[in-house]
Amino acid sequence: MAREGRRFRPRVLHRRRGGQRPTVSARLKRDWPLLLMAAPMMLLVWGFWWIPALGNVIAFQDYKPYTGGIFGSTIVGFTHFQLLFADPAFTRALVNTLSITAFQVVFYFPVPIALALLMHSLVSERLRSMLQSVVYLPYFFSWVLVIAIFQQMLGGAGLLSQTLRANGFEGVDWMTNPDTFILLVTSQAIWKEAGFGAIIFLAALAAIDPNLYEAAAVDGAGRWRRLWHITLPGIRPVIVLLLILRLGDALNVGFEQFFLQRSAVGSQASEVFDTFVYYSGVRTGDFDYGAAAGLFKGVVGLVLILAANKAAHLLGERGVYSKS
């Protein structure tokens, strides 16, 4: 009996005898398969994110890539940041980026949620699979192909203009109209990425207990009341998390999409933060100036994430991280 009692005695994996934590060698011996699987990703993060981030020091230097390098260039302090804030092109890019981000948060962010709710409500598995395939496919298109498709549909010689002219109306060219550019880029983002973005919300919907819907239906709750009191509260933590990440990524509305359409609508409407860094820093060879702009972008993104995460805590959500 004593042997049987020892056999079924629960083991404490994270403690050794006497309440001591396992040694480093013991933990390495136990967890080496997990560390081995994580090693390629850690090398990728270190090689392409953490180590290159040390190069941000050139934002505070008069950087000479061919003569001085990082260790031989003169320190100029915050001079580049002063020039940055006094640059009208920087102000225009910042205003355009924040305007497009705010517009897309209001009109683009709810679309994947609505799409996930629609696909989740379909009874037919066959119809659901077909709809998922159709809405997921544009995500794998390049921006070059997406813009070419929109050009064929909404351009001056596109399908819409030809149809209007054939019926006696004046044609439209939305691809070169700076006044409607914000609507154009938002519709392109919705068509390309909303379907793939719905995957996360579909996973959150699948985690909701079906018994809650059955109990609510027995109590007489209709479809809209079940949606409001069960479905939306069930996916609210995911919505808050993605909204925080979206706000933290506010200055990163995309480079390729705007770069490809910059010549068609002009820089006044299409200049965003990423294109400003390219044209003002990389293309002109002013790497220190571009690094200052990029560092400003990272600091603003960090502040927005911290502020949004604090707001999530005040609303009772966990957010990106929690102190507890």
Image: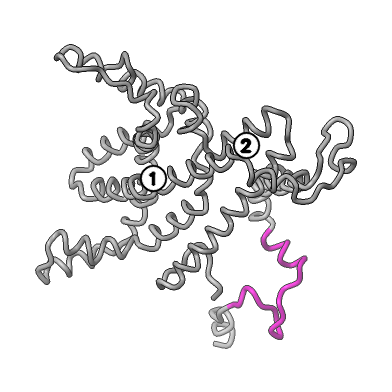
Is residue 123 toward the left or the right of residue 237 in the image? left
Residue farthest along the top direction in this orientation: 166
Task: Name the residue located 26 percent from the left edge and 37 percent from the top edge.
Answer: 131
Q: Which residue is mark 2?
A: 277
Quarter of the picture containing the N terminus is bottom right
Residue 188 drawn at (x, y percent) = 37, 33
Is residue 20 toward the left or the right of residue 134 in the image? right
Task: Name the residue located 46 percent from the left edge and 28 percent from the top edge.
Answer: 143
Could you tell me the amino acid type at mark 2?
A: Val
Could you tell me the amino acid type at mark 1?
A: Gln
- The reply to whether the magenta stretch includes residue 23 is yes
Q: Nearer the viewer, residue 91 or 211?
A: 91
Residue 294 drawn at (x, y percent) = 64, 44
Q: Which residue is mark 1?
A: 104
Residue contact at pointers 1 and 2, CB within 8 angstroms: no
Task: Specify the label residue 138 is tagged with.
Answer: none
Residue 35 drawn at (x, y percent) = 67, 55
Read off the magenta span.
11-31
Quarter of the picture containing the C terminus is bottom right
